C-alpha cells in the first residue's frame, strides 16, 4: 500500500493533481535539483540511514554536529566548536543558538522551535535505545559509558562520554545516523516517522508518493548563509524519481529530465565512456563528467580462521601462496577492460587514496609481477603450481566477469582456480560464518578515518568487520596504541605501519580503489560531493 505525505497540500482532488504533475505551488524546475533513485528510498528516519539512497535525502533534511566537506575535512555544523579531554574520554560541544527545526504540526502553532543540547541527548539516546532497533546503533554501542553517556549541562553545551578512547569519534558524529531530530515529531509518529521527517536541514519534505516521486522544498528558516550573507540553499527544491533501471534514467538524463546521474549502468559503459574512462565525443558538449576517488576498496579475501573446516588442508593457508596471488593479477587490465577506466589499481595497500592523511604511494602493496608470483610459489613448495589442489573463488553475480579473468590469471601461473557464483546476501552470511576460503567483496568507509579500514584486521573484532579472521599481535598492539594517541601525525604513522604489516601477511588481495562518477548538465553549478559520495546541494544553482 502506497503512503502519501505532502505539505502543505491536503485533499483528494489535489492528490490527483500531484500525481499528474500539476502541483500547486511547485517551484519552476529551473530552480529544482532533479535526480533518480533506482532502488527507491526505504525511510527518511536518519537512525536507519544505512545506504546512499537514504543518506542523500537525510543529508538534505537534517544536520549533524559536525560535517565533512568535499576535501574530507571536518567542519563545524550544529556545533560551533568542541574540545576533547586529555584522556580522550570526554567530548564537549558548543552548539549554535540560531538553529530551528522545520515547521511541523507537532509543534505549538506548527512553528519549528529552537534546537538545544537536549535534542542532541534525545537523538543519540534514541539511536541506541533497543526499542528503536536502529541500524545505526553500532556507532555508540560499546563505545559510550553506560551511565550518562550523553549530557546537556545547558541549552548550548553537549557532552559525550566514552568508555575508552576512540579517536575517530568526531568523524563518526558526521554520519547521517547522528542527525538531530525533535522528540515531539518522533514521538507523535513513532515508527511512521520514516515518512514524516523533521530536521534542521536546508530542505524539508513536501510530498512523497513512494515508488513514484519525492519532492523536498527549501526550508525558509534554514540557518546557514554563504560568504556574502545570502541564505542557503539557493535552489527551491529537490525532486527524486524512482525509475527501476539506470539505463532508463540515463535516457531521461539525456533528455534533460534529470540534472544528475550517479554512476552508470554497466550495459551503457561502452556507449558513454571510452576504455580510458572519458566521455565519448557525442556527449562532451552537453554533459559534464566529474570523477573523484571513492573511499572503497574492492578486494579478494582469504579465510585465516584456523578453527574453520574451510581452512583445513587449504593451500591458501600458506602466506607465500597468498602473496603469489597478489602478484599474479594485472589490476590495470581489470580497470581498463572491465571497468572502462573507472577506478584505480589497488597497488598501495588496503587503505584507499583520498583518506585524510594518506596517499597511495605511502603504503606498501603489490604490483603486477608474474615472475615474482612464480618464485613465491616455488618457495612455498609448489613450483609452477605443481601439487596445488584447486581453489574456488566465490563471487556475487555482478563480478563474475572480473573473477573469471582473475581465475585465468591464476591458472596462467599454475594455480588451478575456478569461480563459484553466489547470491550476495548468502555470500556475506558465509563470509561471516567462516564457510568461504576465498571470496570477492568490497569494503566501503563508514566514516572518513582510516581506522574504518584497519578495523577489518583487528583480531578482537568479529566478522564483520574481520571477515578474514586475521590475527597478529603486533598489529593489535599498534591499533590500541593509535586509539590512545592525541597526535594525528603519530596516529597516521601507526595507521600506515598497520596497513603495511597486514599487506605483508596478505590476508586480502586489494584489486582496485573505487571512483565516483557524477554526470551533470553544464547549466548546473555549485554541486559538491566528498569521497564518501555524500552530495551537497546547498550551494547548487542552475542557469
Image (spheres, rainbow, N blue to C red):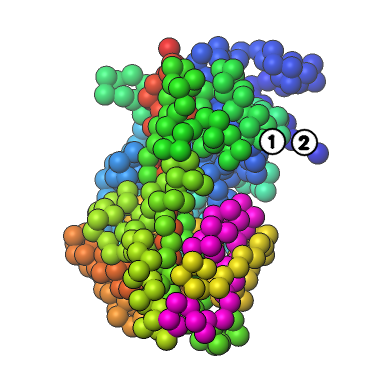
- Residue at the (68%, 20%) spot, across then down: 9
Position of the N terminus, as image quadrant, is top right
Q: Residues within 10 Å of mark 2 (few under 14, many from 20)?
A: few
Q: Of residues 385 and 86, which is closer to you in this image?
A: 385
Query: Residue 371: image x %, image y %?
Result: 35, 69
Residue placed under numbered mark 1 in the picture: 244
Residue placed under numbered mark 2 in the picture: 2
Q: CA distance from mark 1 to mark 2?
A: 16 Å
Q: Quadrant of residue 404?
A: bottom right
Label 2, secondary structure: give it.
loop
Residue 442 image label:
none
Q: Residues within 10 Å of mark 1 (few under 14, many from 20)?
A: some
Q: Quadrant of residue 517?
A: top left
Q: Earlier in the sequence, mark 1 or mark 2?
A: 2
Label 1, secondary structure: give it.
loop
Position of the C terminus, as image quadrant, is top left
Q: Is residue 225 magenta?
A: no
- Residue at the (62%, 23%) spot, across then down: 252
Total labels: the figure holds 2
Instruction: Write down the region rendered in magenta.
Output: 382-409
Amino acid at each position: 500500500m502506497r503512503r502519501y505525505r505532502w505539505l502543505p497540500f491536503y485533499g483528494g482532488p489535489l492528490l490527483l493533481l500531484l500525481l499528474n504533475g500539476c502541483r500547486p505551488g511547485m517551484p519552476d524546475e529551473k530552480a529544482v535539483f532533479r535526480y533518480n533513485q533506482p532502488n527507491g528510498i526505504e525511510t527518511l528516519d536518519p537512525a536507519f540511514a544505512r545506504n546512499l539512497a537514504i543518506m542523500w535525502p537525510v543529508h538534505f533534511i537534517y544536520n549533524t554536529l559536525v560535517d565533512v566537506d568535499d576535501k574530507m575535512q571536518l567542519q563545524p555544523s550544529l556545533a560551533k566548536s568542541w574540545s576533547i579531554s586529555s584522556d580522550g574520554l570526554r567530548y564537549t560541544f558548543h552548539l549554535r543558538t540560531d538553529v530551528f527545526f522545520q515547521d511541523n504540526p507537532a509543534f505549538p502553532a506548527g512553528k519549528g522551535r529552537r534546537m538545544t543540547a537536549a535534542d542532541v541527548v534525545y537523538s543519540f539516546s534514541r539511536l541506541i535505545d533497543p526499542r528503536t532497533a536502529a541500524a545505526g546503533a553500532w556507532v555508540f554501542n560499546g563505545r559510550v559509558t553506560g551511565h550518562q553517556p550523553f549530557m546537556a549541562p545547558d541549552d548550548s553545551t553537549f557532552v559525550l562520554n566514552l568508555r575508552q578512547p576512540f579517536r575517530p569519534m568526531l568523524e563518526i558524529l558526521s554520519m547521517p545516523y547522528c542527525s538531530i531530530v525533535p522528540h515531539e515529531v518522533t514521538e507523535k509518529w513513532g515508527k511512521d516517522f520514516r515518512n514524516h521527517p523533521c530536521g534542521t536541514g536546508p530542505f524539508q519534505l513536501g510530498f512523497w508518493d513512494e515508488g513514484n516521486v519525492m519532492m523536498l522544498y527549501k526550508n525558509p528558516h534554514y540557518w546557514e548563509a554563504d560568504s556574502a550573507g545570502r541564505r542557503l540553499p539557493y535552489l527551491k527544491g529537490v525532486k527524486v524519481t524512482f525509475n527501476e533501471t539506470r539505463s532508463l534514467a540515463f535516457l531521461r538524463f539525456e533528455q534533460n529530465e534529470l540534472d544528475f546521474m550517479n554512476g552508470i549502468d554497466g550495459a551503457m559503459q561502452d556507449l558513454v565512456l571510452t576504455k580510458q574512462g572519458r566521455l565519448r565525443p557525442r556527449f562532451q558538449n552537453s554533459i559534464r563528467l566529474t570523477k573523484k576517488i571513492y573511499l572503497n576498496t574492492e578486494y579478494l579475501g582469504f579465510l585465516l580462521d584456523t578453527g574453520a573446516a574451510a581452512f583445513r588442508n587449504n593451500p591458501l593457508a600458506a602466506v607465500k601462496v597468498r602473496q603469489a596471488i597478489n602478484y599474479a593479477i594485472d589490476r590495470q587490465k581489470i580497470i581498463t577492460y572491465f571497468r572502462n577506466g573507472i577506478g584505480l589499481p589497488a597497488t598501495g595497500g588496503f587503505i584507499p587514496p583520498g583518506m585524510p592523511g594518506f596517499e597511495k604511494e605511502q603504503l606498501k602493496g603489490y604490483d603486477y609481477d608474474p615472475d615474482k608470483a612464480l618464485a613465491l610459489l616455488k618457495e612455498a613448495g609448489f613450483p609452477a603450481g605443481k601439487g596445488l589442489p584447486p581453489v574456488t573463488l566465490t563471487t556475487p553475480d555482478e563480478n563474475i566477469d572480473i573473477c573469471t579473468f582473475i581465475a585465468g590469471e591464476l591458472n596462467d601461473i599454475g594455480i588451478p582456480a575456478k569461480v563459484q557464483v553466489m547470491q550476495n546476501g548468502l555470500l556475506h552470511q558465509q563470509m561471516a560464518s567462516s564457510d568461504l576460503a576465498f571470496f570477492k567483496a568490497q569494503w566501503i568507509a563508514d566514516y572518513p578515518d582510516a581506522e574504518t579500514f584497519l578495523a577489518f584486521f583487528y583480531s578482537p573484532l568479529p566478522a564483520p568487520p574481520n571477515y578474514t579472521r586475521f590475527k597478529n599481535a603486533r598489529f593489535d598492539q599498534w591499533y590500541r596504541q593509535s586509539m590512545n594517541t592525541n597526535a594525528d601525525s603519530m596516529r597516521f604513522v601507526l595507521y600506515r605501519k598497520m596497513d603495511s604489516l597486514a599487506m605483508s601477511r596478505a590476508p586480502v588481495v586489494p584489486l582496485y580503489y573505487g571512483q565516483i562518477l557524477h554526470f551533470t548538465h553544464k547549466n548546473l553549478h555549485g554541486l559538491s560531493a566528498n569521497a564518501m559520495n555524500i552530495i551537497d546541494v546547498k550551494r547548487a544553482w542552475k542557469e
